[in-house]
Amino acid sequence: MAQPSNPFIRQLASSDRKSRTTALASLRTYLSVRRSRNNELSPLDLQKLWKALFYCLWMQDKPLHQQNLSRDLAGLVDILPQARQRGGAEEAETGDNQDENEAEEEAEEDTLVVKWFDCFWLTISREWSAIDALRMDKFLYLVRCYLNTTFQQCSQSHWNPTTTRQLMFTLARGPLSPANVKVPDGLRYHIIDIFVDELEKVDVKRECDVEVVLEPLRVLRSETRNKQARKRAVEALRDERLEEWGVVIQKETNEKGEDGDRDAVMDDDEFGGFDD
């Protein structure tokens, strides 16, 4: 495919607000055109776009404008091709009658949405260390908006199992990956801390498969070597609000319990400095 229009990508990071606004409108049009399967966005295209979008927010001042822009950036997901997957009774009714070509098209469309989320988390992770204290709040809010949008996409699919697993996996292999050392701790901690907050806002009727949704946190808790990340994941998984989804909250263990034993093992593995 042809490369994205360089002028509007450059204008997204312009110091002039009107230029950025115009460029964002052009991007919406551009993404709408990409609905055609012959115009798929490559990983490089997505990286270029997200680098420009990152600096679009970077250049934005005034809290109200920053919040509006963050919501607009999260709303770009809705412009991407959306899979027409069904959940619950609808899915049961269609059963084996779904056309194979349509199923393949839906899978491909879902892939673009997943790639969009993947590239967002990749860009935020790469640029996080460059964010100064004065700009941090707006990027924290952007992360909150994108976590919320992740759950919104699941909800719009009626918590379709495939869609939900795919989107939760963008978190599991991205900012919540226990093995991804390129993810800044501050970003990872923030997502853990707001995870249940955003799920609660979206899944008002408590319809999601909570086991699938919580899987990234559970894997992080079990496999991370970062004590602070593990502690925060444990706290999130013990959030009393999760009982509304039928989650049985485990009681806190003492130092000799499961968590205590794991901390002891991890302490043995951590570097303690050189002896005098």
Image (tube, rainbow, N blue to C red):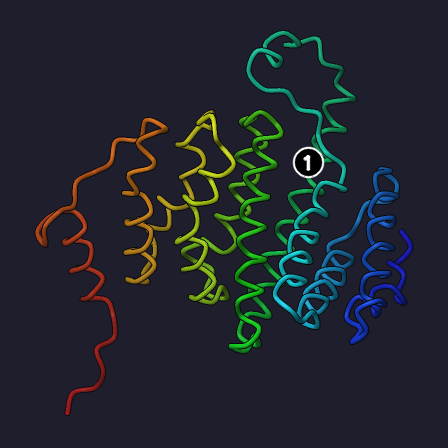
Counting from the top left corner in percent of width and height, residue 258 is at 16, 47
Q: Residues within 10 Å of mark 1 (few under 14, many from 20)?
A: many
Residue 228 in the image: above or below residue 135: above
Q: Residue furthest bottom?
A: 276
Which residue is denoted by mark 1 in the rendering?
110
Q: Is residue 61 left or right of residue 256?
A: right
Indicate left or right for 10 with 274 as reference: right
Whether residue 264 is situated above or below residue 221 in the rendered picture: below
Image quarter in which the C terminus is found: bottom left
SS at circle 1? helix
Task: Residue 167: give x, y in percent of width and height.
Answer: 56, 40
Instruction: Give the x, y percent position of residue 264.
Output: 15, 60
Residue 276 or residue 199, whichever sits in front: 199
Left/right of residue 193 with respect to residue 46 in the rendered view: left
Q: Amino acid at mark 1?
A: Asp
Choose between 228 and 225: the one closer to the eye: 228
Q: Residue at x 84, y 44 (%)?
A: 34
